[in-house]
Image (cartoon, rainbow, N blue to C red):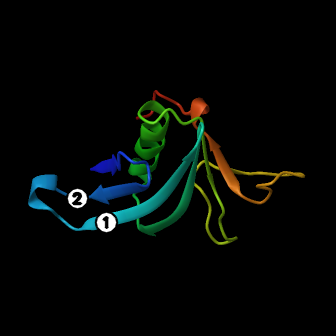
Amino acid sequence: MIWLDPTGSRVRVIDGDPKDRPPYRVLGLLTYHHDVAVIDGLLGRIKPCEVLKFYKMLRDVQGMRWLIAERQAIHKLPMGERIKGPHPFAGWYAVDLTKLDDENG
């Protein structure tokens, strides 16, 4: 189960029923700026099938159009493209959430 903190500061992923209070498998920090979500840290492993669901939650529930993250060379933002050129976030990764394929999940 994936859920976003109502304050918009955290994303959490658990396996099992929330009533049983299972440990978090993934915990991440988010900041929202207008229609841009900035993910700053993600602890744990998110499954590939959960990535699209998470992105769609940001788009459909939170109204975000973009997800951006500063990543090291060995890490990438799934489905993200590197921001190029003279830009304040050059070198970061961005996902255009408006272009997600609704047919696949």
Q: Note whether residue 17 is visible.
A: no
Q: Position of residue 62 (x, y in %)?
A: 45, 36
> Given contact means CB atoms under 8 Å apart, are the residues at marks 1 and 2 in contact?
yes
Does dot 1 land on a helix, a strand or a loop?
A: strand
Q: Position of residue 52 (x, y in %)?
A: 46, 43
* 67 on left or right of 8: right
- Nearer the observer, 1 or 34: 34
The one of 15 and 64 positioned closer to us in this rendering: 64
Residue drawn where x is 45% and y is 49% of the image: 51
Mark 1: which amino acid? Answer: Arg
User: Circle 1 sits on which residue?
Assistant: 25
Residue found farthest to the left: 20
Q: Nearer the viewer, residue 1 or 101?
A: 1
Disc 1 versus disc 2: distance between alpha carbons? Answer: 7 Å
Per the image, the residue denoted by label 2 is 15
Relative to residue 23, is residue 15 depicted above or below? above
The crowd level at tag 1 (other Cα within 10 Å; few <14, some 14-19, many 20+) is some
